[in-house]
Image: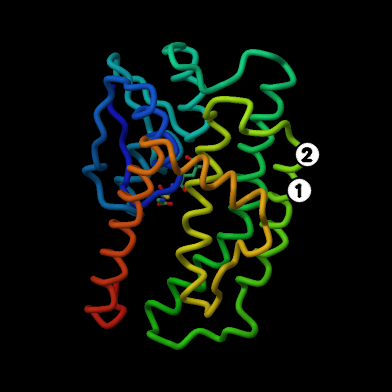
Amino acid sequence: MKLFNLDNSPFAARVRMQIRHKGLPIDFVEPPEELRTQKFREAYPLGKVPALELDNGDMIAESTAIMNYLESVFPETPMRPAGAIEQAQNEMLVRYTDNHLSLGLSPVFQEFFALLNSQQVPDHKEGRFDLLMPELRKLERLLIQLPSYKERELQTGDLCVVGNLYYVNELASYFGKHDVLEGLNTVNSWLQWVMAYPAVATEIDVMNESHRAMVKSRSKQGGKT
Ligand SMILES: N[C@@H](CCC(=O)N[C@@H](CS)C(=O)NCC(=O)O)C(=O)O
């Protein structure tokens, strides 16, 4: 099996963390097609990565579909709980990331790339980053309400949250925000717990290096893509 992925993609990083944590025999490869081209869109079922290519050539798109498939096919070191309520609780973290956190993060990304391209100084007061803050407070409430992570193993929901949360922290500084997780005590202690897993820490590092290299190269080009 092959995982078509990009180092700086949080959606790919969550799958790589799972593969690394479970020790699965799956290669990580960059898509040979250039991003956002017609060829790229045609090569993958939904025109995005990550995409998992099976040995028979079948392709699975969508990070969460891939993660569920891998849990079904490789049940050792389970990262998706067995019980109905535990499954729903894990799923809440997955859905929180894709339906709440990512939606708040997406306009921040757009603004970030606009800033990078125009080399403008961010407007710290009116930035879209402020719209993201309520989404972070939602995570605090969710983690308080769910049974403590300390009583369970690492799950797919944790991987989804931590990959996207990396970008919240990373982009914050460009918008003049510091300590965006300040006061979110449960989020902070959960983050410490999740980052202590080597598979998580390694893939966050990979994402960080790749993201920073991209920023550096765009800045050198005077913001031109
Ligand atoms: N919902 C998708 C999101 C994947 C996604 O947005 N991938 C980005 C990279 S981070 C991509 O392939 N973008 C290329 C494009 O939109 O042309 C998932 O969970 O896999």
What residue do we see at 54% from left, 25% from top?
A: 153
Q: Residue at x 31, y 69 (%)?
A: 215
Near mark 1 (Cα within 10 A), the count class, few <14, some 14-19 or many ≥20, is few
Q: How many numbered discs, if any? A: 2
Colour mapping used in the image: rainbow
The image quarter in which residue 161 lies: top right
Quarter of the image where one finds residue 93? top right
Q: Residue at x 52, y 32 (%)?
A: 64
140, 36: nearer the viewer: 140
Callout 2: SS = helix
Q: How many angstroms separate mark 2 from mark 1 (CA)?
A: 6 Å
Q: Position of residue 86 (x, y in %)?
A: 69, 22
Residue 177 relative to residue 31: left or right = right
Residue 72 point in image, percent of width and height = 49, 13
- Disc 1 within 8 angstroms of ligand 1 (CB): no
- Secondary structure beneath disc 1? helix
- The amino acid type found where label 2 is placed reads Gln
Query: Where residue 89 appears, x then y in whole percent?
Result: 70, 29
In this picture, is 63 found above or below 88? below
Amino acid on which the number 1 mark rests in the picture? Arg
- Percent position (x, y) of residue 24? 32, 20
Q: Compared with residue 126, is residue 153 higher up or lower down, i.e. above or below?
A: above
In the displayed structure, 143 sits above or below 78; it is below
Quadrant of the frame with the C terminus: bottom left
Q: Nearer the viewer, residue 219 or 175?
A: 175
Circle 1 residue = 141
Q: Looking at the image, is 17 positioned above or below residue 76?
A: below
Which residue is disc 2 drawn over?
145
Residue contact between numbered discs 2 and 1, judged by CB atoms under 8 Å: yes
Say whether residue 13 is left or right of residue 35: right
Quadrant position of the N terminus in the picture: top left
